[in-house]
Image (cartoon, helix red, strand yellow):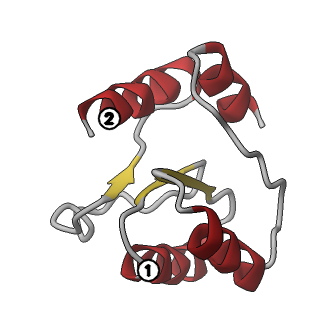
Amino acid sequence: FMLALFLRRRGVRVAFLGQNIEETSLLRFVTELHPQVVCLSVTLPANEQRALALARQLLSQGKVHVYLGGRAAINDGMLENTPHLTVLTVAGTEAADSIKRNLTTV
């Protein structure tokens, strides 16, 4: 929620879908509305692989950039060469600034 607030303060149009949205609903949202960016928060290590699988599904749907952030975000170098996928190593305003910079270069 805080990231959405920080992005809104930077003039980014945000659709906050809440916590624990069903994967099928998120995939349908992306298919229908074609957002530039989808941000996923991974707070529990047990959810890492599920979040990564969801990120790959989102990327396979088309032109969307996926950001993975949160306490348990995967940052082991495996994802460095995955186009349109960024693991956020910063939080809060720094994460919002990073996303905003990427949006202005697209």
Label 2 amino acid?
Asn
Determine the residue positioned at 15% across, 66% down: 81
Read off the residue under disc 2: 102
In percent of width and height, residue 12 lies at 57, 27
Read off the residue under disc 1: 61
Q: Residue furthest left?
A: 81
Q: Nearer the viewer, residue 32 or 15?
A: 32
In percent of width and height, residue 10 lies at 56, 15
Q: Nearer the viewer, residue 50 or 8?
A: 8
Label 2: which secondary element: helix
Determine the residue positioned at 42% across, 43% down: 88
- Label 1 crowd bin: few (<14), some (14–19), many (20+), radius 10 Å: few
Q: How many marks?
A: 2
| Left or right: where 56 falls relative to 27 | left
Q: Nearer the viewer, residue 96 or 13?
A: 13
| Left or right: where 53 falls relative to 5 | left
Q: Are marks 1 and 2 in contact (CB under 8 Å)?
A: no
Label at residue 72: none
In percent of width and height, residue 30 lies at 59, 68
Between the C-alphas of marks 1 and 2, the distance is: 20 Å
